[in-house]
């Protein structure tokens, strides 16, 4: 262990941050990883499957968790944010603000205790499509495997209930925010992304119609741990989906919203079309697209889907989505740019393929960094000692994220070695 060298600060505990942390720690460097959520894994652990192999994200996630558990050089702070950074390469100072979890032990709470409660909160892991109890486990594979108490959602009656039900010392309702000051030699920014706000897409029914959902919500619908146990059904009435449309570039490649391509949306929709077809052999899938963009070997996944007679791809940008009041079915108006025909088609449900927005578009790193016009951190920044990784730098898939994060870890290590 290089105990005489300052640690590396990794901001963000998604796949990018976890990869950078374990790569640096396994060659002897200390790492402090800070994650704002109550668990590690970021957006990827919320997915149902990876493309093109269609394996669950728990495969890679479990490997990284095991590497973290086995490595004493990694210190993790969840429910925490970096509030201030000062200094320079080799000698940074950072202030971390850690929110109270109110649960003091990883294994002191179990589901039988939460069942006695009536207070509920929106399940943000499932993008608000269901509710959890105020005392909850973030998800089945959460790391750390500790419950969280949403104190603001807890009623007075439930406060009394959990005080009597939970073992002594399992909860601390007086827990307060913790402020942590650290010194580090290098910083990796792996703050990840968020889906584009569909409420801004009025013409596509974003946030207006219950059966218009986003691509990230579809992942949770298809997941066994999701709000419907993996059954892809309409949010409005629980009806099995028979006829579904995917709207590509929902807000993307559009000067009024996101002018850029997010690189992964086409593959995500093709993958989700397969979810539908696996569950229902009679289901019809229509994908409305500007261009279908798949990279390298992923072309085969695209051509395999073209062979499915129940999957139709129509080149055309959807102009408007309206809802039938009686049935909650959705009417799409779109011009087929190949046939020049104006289409007016009805569907059970619509999935909007929204683009990737960097989290740094809303919340900047508390240090003077360079950002592009869309909020991504400029990868060619002149700030020595601070390195962006993954979707904090540009839209990318999981494979590219892991390579990019390994590169960031190497740059951080080189920075530390220059200061020895």
Image (cartoon, rainbow, N blue to C red):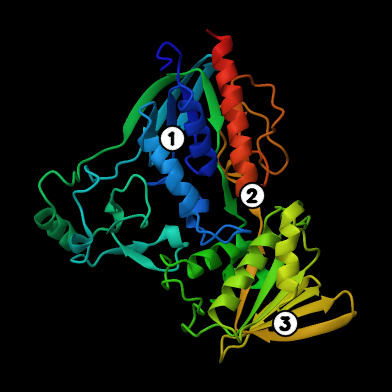
Q: Is residue 393 left or right of residue 192?
A: right
- How packed mark 2 is, by other alpha carbons closer than 10 Å (few <14, some 14-19, many 20 or more), is some
- In the depicted structure, whether residue 325 falls above or below residue 6: below
Q: Is residue 119 left or right of residue 69?
A: left
Q: Could you say which is closer to the camera, residue 222 or residue 98?
A: 222
Could you tell me which residue is drawn at 42 percent across and 26 percent down? Answer: 95
Mark 2 or 3, closer to the camera = 3
Mark 1 or 3, closer to the camera = 3
Callout 3: SS: loop
Could you tell me which residue is drawn at 60 percent across and 59 percent down? Answer: 53
Q: Is residue 83 left or right of residue 277?
A: left
Task: Tell me residue 213's x, y (percent).
Answer: 57, 70
Q: Is residue 260 left or right of residue 87?
A: right
The numbered mark at residue 397 is 2
- Taking the view exactly as shown, the residue that stands out farthest to the top is 420
Mark 1 or 2, closer to the camera = 2
Res 343 → quadrant: bottom right
Looking at the rendered image, the quarter that the N terminus falls into is top left
Q: What is the distance, in whole Å, between disc 1 and disc 3 at their CAs?
A: 47 Å
Res 195 → quadrant: bottom right
Residue 89 seen in this snapshot: no
Task: Tell me residue 229's x, y (percent).
Answer: 41, 72
Disc on the earlier residue, 1 or 3: 1
- In the depicted structure, whether residue 63 falls above or below residue 369: below
Res 258 → quadrant: bottom right
Callout 2: SS: loop
Residue 164 seen in this snapshot: yes
- Name the residue carrying label 3: 309
- Taking the view exactly as shown, the residue that stands out farthest to the bottom is 326
- Name the residue carrying label 1: 34
């Amino acid at each position: 262990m290089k105990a005489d060298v300052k640690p590396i600060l990794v901001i963000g505990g998604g796949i990018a941050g976890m990869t950078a942390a374990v790569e640096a720690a396994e060659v002897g460097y200390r790492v402090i990883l800070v994650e704002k959520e109550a668990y590690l894994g970021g957006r990827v652990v919320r997915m149902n499957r990876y493309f093109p192999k269609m394996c669950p994200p728990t495969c890679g996630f479990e490997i990284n968790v095991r590497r973290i558990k086995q490595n004493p050089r990694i210190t993790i702070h969840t429910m925490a944010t970096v509030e201030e950074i000062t200094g320079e390469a080799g000698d940074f100072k950072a202030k971390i603000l850690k929110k109270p979890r109110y649960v003091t032990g990883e294994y002191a709470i179990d589901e039988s205790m939460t069942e006695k409660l009536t207070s509920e909160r929106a399940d943000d892991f499932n993008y608000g499509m269901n509710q959890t109890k105020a005392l909850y486990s973030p998800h089945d594979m959460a790391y750390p495997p500790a419950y969280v108490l949403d104190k603001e959602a807890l009623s007075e009656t439930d406060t009394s209930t959990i005080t009597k039900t939970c073992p002594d010392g399992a909860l601390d309702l007086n827990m307060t925010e913790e402020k942590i000051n650290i010194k580090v030699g290098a910083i990796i920014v792996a703050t990840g992304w968020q889906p584009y706000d569909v409420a801004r897409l009025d013409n596509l029914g974003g946030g207006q119609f219950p059966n218009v959902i986003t691509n990230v919500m579809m992942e949770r619908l298809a997941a066994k741990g999701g709000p419907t146990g993996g059954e892809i059904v309409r949010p409005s009435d629980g009806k099995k989906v028979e006829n579904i449309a995917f709207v590509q570039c929902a807000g993307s490649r559009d000067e009024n919203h996101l002018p850029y391509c997010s690189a992964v949306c086409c593959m995500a929709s093709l993958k989700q079309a397969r979810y539908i077809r696996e569950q229902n052999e009679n289901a019809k899938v229509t994908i409305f697209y500007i261009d279908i963009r798949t990279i390298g070997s992923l072309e085969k996944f695209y051509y395999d889907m073209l062979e499915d007679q129940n999957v139709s791809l129509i080149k055309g940008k959807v102009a408007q989505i309206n809802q039938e009041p009686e049935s909650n079915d959705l009417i799409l108006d779109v011009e087929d740019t190949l046939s020049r025909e104006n289409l007016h088609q009805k569907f059970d449900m619509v999935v909007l393929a929204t683009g990737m927005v960097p989290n740094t578009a809303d919340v900047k790193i508390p240090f003077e960094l360079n950002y592009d016009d869309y909020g991504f951190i400029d990868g060619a920044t002149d700030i020595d000692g601070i390195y962006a990784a993954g979707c904090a730098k540009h839209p990318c898939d999981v494979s590219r994220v892991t390579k990019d994060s390994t590169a960031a870890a190497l740059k951080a290590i080189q920075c530390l070695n220059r200061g020895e």
